[in-house]
Image (spheres, helix red, strand yellow):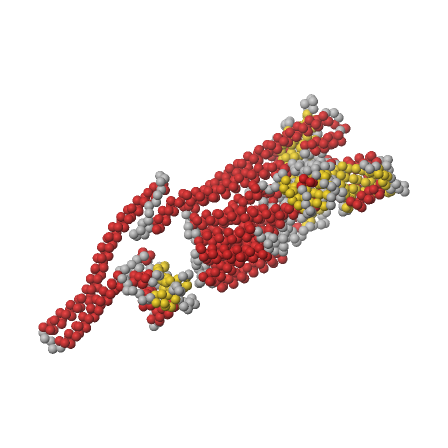
Amino acid sequence: MKNRLLKYIPAVFTLVFFLLAVSTEYYFRQNDRLANVANHTRQVLEKKEQLLKNDLGELQTAITKKDGVLQKYDNFSEFEKDLKKDGFVIVAYKQDSLLFWSDNSFLIPEKNFLEEENSLVVRLDDGFYFMQKQKVDSIDLYGFLLLKKIYPYQNKFLKNHFGPDFLIPDSFDISLHPNVGASVSNPDGKFLFSLLDDNAGMGTRRGQKGVGLLYLLAILSGLVFFSILLRQLNDLKLGLSAFLVWGAGLVLLRYFMLLWGFPAVFSKFEIFSPVLFASSFFFPSLGDFVINSFFLFIFVYTYSRFLAINQFFKPKSSYQVAGWIFVHLILFYLLYFTIEDLFESLIFDSSFSLQMFVFQDNGICIFIGFAILIFLFYALGQIANLLGQIARDHWNLKSYLLAVIPVSIVLSLVFYYFNPVKTDAVTMGFPILMVLVLGLINYQKEKGGRYSLYVALLLGVSIFVTNRINSFSSQKEKQDRQVVAMNLSTEYDPASEFFLMEIQEKLDQDSILKDLCKRPFRNESEIEDYIQNKYFTGFWEQYHLQVTICSNMDDLNIEPDNQIRNCFEFFEEMIVTTGEPIPNSNFYYLNEFDGMVSYLGVISNPSFASDEVKIYLRLDSKFGNEGLGYPDLLLDEKVDLRPVSHEYSYGKYQNGKLIASSGKFNYFMSNAGFGESSADFFWKQIDGYDHLVYKFGNNSVVVSCPSVSWYNRGITIPYVFVLFYVFGFSIWMLEKVSSKFRINLSFKYRIQYSIIGLLMLFFLLLGGGTVYYNINQANEANNRSLQEKLLLVKREVIRDLSGDRSQKSEVLTDQLRQLSNLIFADIHLYNLSGKLIATSRPEIFEKKLQGKRMNFAAYDQLFFNERTHFIHKEQIGKMSYLSAYESLVDENNETIAFVNLPYFLKSKELEKEMFNLILAGVNLHVLMILLAIFLSVIISNKITYPLRLIQSRLKATRFGSYGEQIEYTKNDEIGSLVKEYNQMLVELEESASRLAKSERESAWREMAKQIAHEIKNPLTPMKLSIQFLQKRFEDKTPNWEEHFNRVSKTLIEQINALSSIAAAFSNFAKMPAAKNENLNLVEILEHTVDLFKNDDFDLKLDLNSIENASVFVDKEQFVRVFVNLINNAIQSIPEGNLAQVVIELENINSDYQVSVIDNGSGINPEIKEKLFSPNFTTKSSGMGLGLSIVKNIVENANGSIWVESERHIGSCFIVRIPKRKEI
């Protein structure tokens, strides 16, 4: 009863998880409604208001202790962490001077604005804040609580968000108007702000992970429940029909889930975004790919277990076995080539790679991809394993191999015929290898052999999977590189075009430029300087800017040919021949293919005279300049900054001559170094690089990438192996736990898993220590590099700061830009008040991503603690980077300024370098884990070999045959065990000899007793009859003849009894020669059953549709055999129970098997081995010769007989007779 209820546990979990998911989703939807969100916000705001007031009081106390001067704030770092955690910013003014600021990312408003602002909620440049004010003497304290952070644009680092603890969906917005949305008030009832929902009715926006997990668990539990139900079906036809319905149901379920987008919360997760993967309707995302592959795995796994576990699935003949194997072999190959197509799609239709040496760029997506491959290949393995399970009970290994190999080769050739492009030797050979190895595993009798083959198979699968990953990734990379080459042939920069569109908007509204253009020729130099400094600084340092102002009457002298051309005509021709307009602007991309990215802008200006004046802006990229500093942070997420991967190098050739190059590869001055080819695209391998040469006209582009090393090609193997091994081990554990809830591991496996576990623990600890050490070393190296750069900047800048600094801001800016290009890092310069003086990257402040005050933690260390330098991590949005500060001192050793290097120009390179160090350590330890698994197999086999040898010798030990002694020379614990075993063999042989002699003597005594007893019974009545006849003779009785006849009859009866006894013993000693002939076993069984047809019990004959079972036996003897077995079966049934006896005939390979099954009380295991011994009986009378004679008859016919029994359930006597061989 308990076991029956256990199977419904997954159904209960399914219902519970589904109800929890629906209710949780409903709960968040209700709480995300405006009124509920506003109420929660009001409660949080009330608590935060008190916390902010306490923090202001703490700062006020610190300032008061210093008599209104913040000389040093004790334990500022902890105070800063607490403020950021709560979303607070505090600033303090002393009169009009800024005394304290807690966060340099906060754009500090002017004090006049703060004094005049009476609202509790204010809209500042970077978002909405709740504000509190406190005043102590001449000190003004302002506390700000972040309500919503707003950035000028969005990208992976900059996302608009609400303050911590509010739990407001990001789609909500804030308004300062009380008549819209849901209002939020303070405890006094004063209106603060309103909340607006821009995404109403679009589902949950909070608790998405929890709701998604609950839906996923519900689906998983439901699949497990149906899997358990289907595996317990005990009818083949019903089971196959159920699987057909279940398979169709799974397909329909996925169809409607995709059609209706259920569960809707899945679409909120990144893995369900088509950005990562998209292929077709059924595979629209990576998450759906995982679900589909798991559906396939659970279906195939359930089907294979259904056929393997249930005993009713027994093909009756070799033809049926061959049919089942052929059908499943076709299914195996159909599934294999389907998986091959899905595998290819996973690589080609995704935006990430499964190659482990590029793990940093792909992260968790690699393991999701591996999970898909695990589900697919384990599903394939289940079908291959099923082939071996079907065959092993009916065919020997040789027959299996002879059947499977030719058919597999034929099927591989068929698929090659239909798709020769995608089918190679590896593709054709892998399924054959998989079928063969899994077949060998099923035919292995020892568990150790099966485990070793399983590990070897996993290694083969890992090598194959890695090979396909490398092959498909290489093909995909070549396609991507062709696209890159074609893009490079057009020489455009999407980031520049994005900024040009922004510049156009500003130019259209620039009143200063319009005033200057009223007298364009008089203000020509001022216009050029204004445009250069206003619009083309920072990012545009990588371009040369040429400004040309001319009217429709002006001519230009075109160098180097000194041609005189009309200005308007010259530029218009340039636009017509090479220009491509940039949308929503008056700028044009110039496709001149001269190794530079070029743009042309036109500013039209009708003058007061009749002539029209235009300003032409020509931008040409500088060679080798790829920009510095913050570009990733400054770009909208809609713009792709780099069309060329960091791994690529490229060279551009015009008329065979190199005109531009970029990257690490050292290109030839002439494209002849790459050879010649008539194709537009061709490949070359030179100097450890793979080169794609793209020719178009007289020009060519070469895109180069470092060749993938064998190490990088093979490093994926151990990862795949370990993941496949862990998944297989988990499945095995679940199967063991689900069956009787206990796991019994042999000594050998305990050794293996102990070795693996200890080594994995050791490698994890060692790997963790290695990673920790590498990170510390990398951080120290980065800090040293920053300090070196700071010293260089310090020497260069300090000269310009030693004089009158107020007149040198432009000089400082230019100097910082030059130094920035030199050291590949941006530079900020702050005065002694922490205020920005100059910067090499003004965009970061112009776009209001950071305030113009230095980090106060650095200011505290340098100014108050008088440290020389300070390095720590800072953050803009979600971008974290190292930031180094240094004090600049003059010749009088007085601090005159602070210089700051925000070091994330090289942040990606540093991060990648650190990650490569970590990955190298992880790779080493994964390889060690792989080695540990193989060593555990070898070591455990070596250790347990003597034990297994002892086991096999003990297993082979029989009475009269005691095997050979084991040779083991080592003097250890196993040696002692072997020695005791050898000594036991000697003693056992001696004991067996004595026992045999004793048993022979005892047997003769018992036999003599039995014979004497059996003879004595008829002798007594014979003696009495003769004495009676003698007395009648002596008495001359008249009717003496009548008495004589009666006594004679009695004597004859008793003599016949003695003769029967003698015949029985004679038959036991030696069976009479059998009169064998060709007979139909079916007729013998039917004749035997007819003998009992009038008896009062239930006797059934099941021939399993066998009409002719030809055997070569003695009919009389085998009738006697079956009569004896049926009588024994009837007599074993307790009184009062309805006797039921079944005789079943089966076709087993080269034999016919007859089973006599009863529902009796069963046989005691203690006497089971003695049943076929002579003179043994379980009855109260009789000689005990019946079953021994039966066994003798069967064995004389080259057959065999044995019994299977279970107490209180019944017994089954099994007789197996060879089929008659046709001549």
Which residue occupies the extreme left position in the image? 1035
- The image quarter in which residue 614 lies: top right
Left or right placement of residue 94 versus residue 707 in this view: right
The total of numbered circles placed on residues is: 0
Where residue 1117 sits in the image (x, y, percent)? 31, 66
Where residue 985 sits in the image (x, y, percent)? 30, 47
246 over 1086 or under it: above or below: above
Foreground of the two, 68 or 944: 944
Foreground of the two, 858 or 275: 275
Q: Is residue 1109 visible from the viewing direction of this image?
A: yes
- Residue pictured at 47% horizontal, 44% vertical: 934
Foreground of the two, 205 or 964: 964
Left or right placement of residue 618 versus residue 391 in this view: right
- Residue pictured at 47% horizontal, 56% vertical: 402
Left or right placement of residue 232 versus residue 557 in this view: left
Where residue 980 sits in the image (x, y, percent)? 32, 43
**Quarter of the image that includes the N terminus:** bottom left
Where residue 882 sits in the image (x, y, percent)? 63, 35
Foreground of the two, 170 or 90: 170
Left or right placement of residue 1060 versus residue 191 in this view: left
- Residue pictured at 64% horizontal, 29% vertical: 788
Q: Is residue 751 visible from the viewing direction of this image?
A: no
Which residue occupies the extreme right position in the image? 610
703 over 343 or under it: above or below: above
- Residue pictured at 59% horizontal, 57% vertical: 418
Which residue occupies the extreme bottom position in the image? 1038
